[in-house]
Amino acid sequence: MLGSAAARSRLALVCGLIAVQLALVVALCNRIHPIRPTGRVQVLAFGWSLMVLAVLGWAWRTGALTGRALSRLLLIGCACLQLGAVLGPPVSSDDDFRYVWDAKVQLAGIDPYRYAPSNPALLRLRGSFLFPAQQPCLHNPVPGGCTVINRPFVHTIYPPAAQLAFDAIWVASDGDHRGHLPFQLAAALGVLVTTMLLIRLANQRGSPLWPVAAWALSPIVAVEATNNAHIEWLVALLSVLALLALRSGRPVAAGTAIGAAIATNLYPGLMLVTAGRRPLRLVAAATGVLALGYLPHVLAVGPKVLGYLPGYLREENYDNGDRYILVSWFVGHHASSYLAPAVLLAALAWLWWRGDDAMPERTAVVAVGAYLLVTTPNYSWYALMLIALIGASGQLRWLWLGFAPTLEYESVESGWGPHRASVVGYGIALAIAALAMILDHGRIHTLWKRTNRRRGLQSARTERRRVPGSS
């Protein structure tokens, strides 16, 4: 047992490290001075978060932190980081402008998939927050004015559950009069609730609590979920809810949560691999929620419900294979457009068949990790679901992959070219995943045991030779 003085000193060390992490988040997100999330600052913040995680693990193992104390520390630290993140407007994304607009359109009784923001049919809904009166226009010119909404000439890409979340936040905040803050506060609350659920999941699993810090104290989560208000915070929350339901033996509840997550941002469909060999109830529940979400919009606007999704895939060069950075590095761009989806589908099929029903969080984190390694997105908020699953599973090997999209996203400000940053970031992540797979299969461990056994036999023979009369 540690003496109280030693325990207090280690607790003070942990608190000091979290305070520095908070300072880094504030430096990234405040409006007092012009620091922005450049690549160098993001690398520093990510590296510091790894140090915090390591010290938390050390303090846990040495008994300096009890389970209750660590739970409180994680919740307080998480809350402080989110408060630091809302000190300023979004620093590296303008997606929340579209969230506000979609909510305003839908609450006016118009299907959000029917018109693009530039359409003159929506002129009466324009306000100064989204359509500032600027001459000349400093943002995106549209017929009749100027808008801060990105891609104003295309239809929305966000699925129905995301639209419902936008509506709820818009109503709760009395419209768009309060700017970005309502969406940031909703995200901050969602991050904190997700932390609570991760703590509950760790206690349910009987696992150490300190890996939850991978989510709770992550600068990526603070910047991308809270400051930039990306709706992927809801994806992470719903994914953890699904894991809790699976752990409790409630496949219908798990399927409902997964269906809602898919209806928020389509890639959580990866969670379906956790259904195991008897997937009927889980998949039926997920499919039912997704169908109910899309049905009224399909009836109202038909194929327009796809929004900008096909255009987005073309814009990101998934159609010609350029975006599959790792796969195209091995087989070329043209072949990767066919091979990359096949590799991903094969990996997901293998996970579904071989996944451990008793540990769905491990199956889920590998599925999302495989997805990111194959698709290599360049938007840092796409890693939020992975970071939550790292906290849920304790699989820290995926932490660098959670940072790889940020490395590319901030590559211009850091002085790196996007392609080089992507190759380095995802290449390191792939190497770590491959090494972890080798270790998981026990090859190195088996070799180590054989080596030790040989050394033991040689030592025993040497000893017998030294003993007189031994044969």
Image: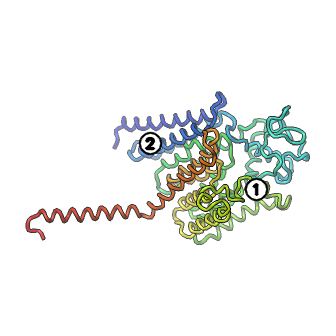
Q: Which residue is mark 1?
A: 309
Res. 242 in view: no
Q: Residue at x 35, y 41 (%)?
A: 2
* Quarter of the figure with residue 138: top right
Please tell me which of labels 2 and 1 falls first in the chain: 2
Which amino acid, mark 2?
Val
Q: Which residue is most to the top? A: 32
Quadrant location of the C terminus in the rendered image: bottom left
Which amino acid, mark 1?
Leu
Give percent across and percent down for residue 437. Answer: 48, 61
Q: Residue at x 28, y 64 (%)?
A: 453
Determine the secondary structure under disc 1. Answer: helix
Give percent across and percent down for residue 342. Answer: 64, 66
Give percent across and percent down for residue 161. Answer: 73, 54
* Quarter of the figure with residue 257: bottom right
Considering only vertical position in the picture, is 369 above or below 192?
below
* Crowd tier of the residue under label 2, counting other residues whose Cα lies within 10 Å: few below 14, some 14–19, many 20 or above: some
Name the side, left or right, on which 19 lies relative to 3.
Answer: right
Res. 240 in view: yes
> Which is nearer the eye, 53 or 467?
467
> Which is nearer the eye, 442 or 130?
442
Determine the secondary structure under disc 2. Answer: helix
> Which is nearer the eye, 453 or 221?
453
Tags 2 and 1 touching, CB below 8 Å = no
* Quarter of the figure with residue 294: bottom right
* Crowd tier of the residue under label 1, counting other residues whose Cα lies within 10 Å: few below 14, some 14–19, many 20 or above: some
Q: Which residue is mark 2?
A: 55
Q: CA distance from mark 2 to mark 1?
A: 42 Å
